[in-house]
Image: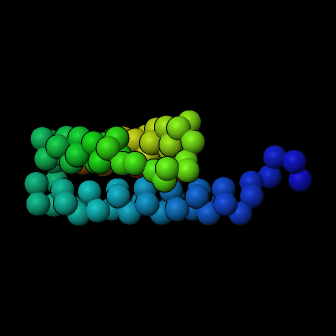
Amino acid sequence: MIGSPNTSEISLGFAALTLWSSLVSTLLELAAFHDNKPGPWLDDLEERFVKVVKTADASPNTPDEAELAGMESAIRMITAAVEEVRARLRGEPAKRTSFEL
């Protein structure tokens, strides 16, 4: 079928979904050590996560545009996960149940 995702795309999507969910769960667990409140600790972690992504270097065989697209997706995932955690810690209902590339 034209436009159907291939196995690689499905695998990548599943990996992103599970990593996003794991990141949200881990950050919520860490929040318990910070009185279940968002704050500088969460801002610092987000900043560190994004810095790691920005300094990562893909394979030398990866085209620059593919590397940039992957980097942008990773940063969107991090930002979405941290925003989700902030919202939940403020007592808001879950806004997302997944992450979209």
Residue 3 lies, in percent from the top left, at 81, 46
Relative height, residue 100 to residue 18 (above, below):
above
**10 with respect to 52 (left or right):** right
Residue 99 can be seen, yes or no: no
In-front residue for pair 72/84: 72
Q: Residue at x 26, y 57 (%)?
A: 27
Q: Position of residue 10 (x, y in %)?
A: 66, 60
34 is higher (above) or lower (below) than 72? below
Residue at figure coordinates x 29%, y 62% from the top left: 26
In the image, taking residue 45 as reference, residue 58 lies left or right, namely right
For this orientation, the residue located farthest to the front is 60
Residue 74 location in percent, x, y? 43, 46
Q: Quadrant of residue 80?
A: top left
Render colour scheme: rainbow
Given residues 54 and 3, the one toward you in this image is 54
Quadrant in which the C terminus appears? top right
Viewed as shown, does residue 101 lie left or right of 92? right
Residue 6 shows up from this direction: yes
Is residue 42 toward the left or the right of residue 12 in the image? left
Total numbered circles: 0
Q: Residue at x 40, y 48 (%)?
A: 57
Residue at image position (18%, 56%) is: 31
Residue 96 at what x, y percent from top left? 47, 47
